[in-house]
Amino acid sequence: MKAFEWKKKGSFYTLEGNSIFVIDEGNSEDVLVILHGYPTSSYDYYKILPELSKKYRVIIHDHLGFGFSDKPLNYSYSLIEQADIALQLWKKLNLKKVTLLAHDYGTSIATEILARQNTKQISLKIKELILCNGSIHIEYSKLKLIQKLLKNKYLGKLTAKLSSFTLFRRNLKQTYFNKNKITDFELKEMWLQLENNNGKRVIHKLTNYINERYYYWHRWIGALEKTKIPTKIIWAQNDPIAIPKIGKLIHQDIASSKLYWIENCGHFLMLEKPNEFIDLVLKK
């Protein structure tokens, strides 16, 4: 699917003065909200949306700074603020009860939301949680060089300025187990969305989420340890960044969790192994 075709499927909502791109498909009373990963967008789910929307009303938004959403220069892009935006959007859509699926960057937004729910700061009921390949236990993450450079206080802005499709293509392909499962066509459409609204100017700010995972470690790991929400952990076994050990630790953290593996699969499991991923998301 071309990026502009994906854009035509969605709509825009204004939250805190910023325009947020939202996909909202399906007519079911069962609602699935999705928090996508870094540095991509809701487009990660284009392969599996048709099947998921047969069972759920599926709502995916581009986080601020990503995809087709606004990318303001004067913004901190804290995961705390990304959680604010997600919760405001869901409130605007009048959602009361949801299944929450989060991948990569989105898993830390999810843990912030859990921290608030555990202390009864929000009324939204999360009936099921699905966590996928996010380096919540950041101490075990195998960060790529480009991530280390982008999050660096001094080198981040320059690295962002020098970033290119060639660099993006090489780094994203390296996260796949089977490199033939991602095409140059898909990569170009992803890059177009990253560049949209002058996105290169803020990519280094977005990458600060890695530092926040250290800073808020006790808050977010604590939220997992306290939650009683039934949780599926769906983990790609060959992820070179969010390694299997992280999935196992999250399984230990959440008493009410079940751990499922997708073998011969890298970081973007919904793109590399879409059918297996769908089966596990829908598994009872």
Image: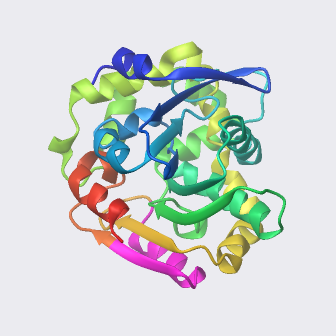
Horizontal relation, residue 46 to residue 193: left or right: left
Work out whether residue 73 or residue 57 is closer to the camera in this orientation and state it.
57
**Could you tell me which residue is drawn at 65 percent across and 31 percent down?**
64
**Could you tell me which residue is drawn at 37 percent across and 43 percent down?**
53
Quarter of the image containing the N terminus?
top left
User: Which colour style is shown?
Assistant: rainbow
- Residue 266 figure quarter: bottom left
Stretch of the chain drawn in magenta: 242-260
List x then y, in percent, for residue 71. Answer: 65, 22
**Could you tell me which residue is drawn at 77 percent across and 70 percent down?**
118
**Could you tell me which residue is drawn at 48 percent across and 31 percent down?**
23
List x then y, in percent, for residue 167. Answer: 38, 30
Q: For residue 175, say whether it is visible.
A: no
Work out whether residue 135 or residue 270 is closer to the camera in this orientation and state it.
270
Quarter of the image containing the C terminus?
bottom left
Q: For residue 12, say whether it is visible.
A: yes
List x then y, in percent, for residue 79. Answer: 70, 47
Q: Is residue 278 magenta?
A: no
Horizontal relation, residue 120 to residue 63: left or right: right
Above/below status of 59 relative to 238: above
List x then y, in percent, for residue 61. Answer: 55, 35
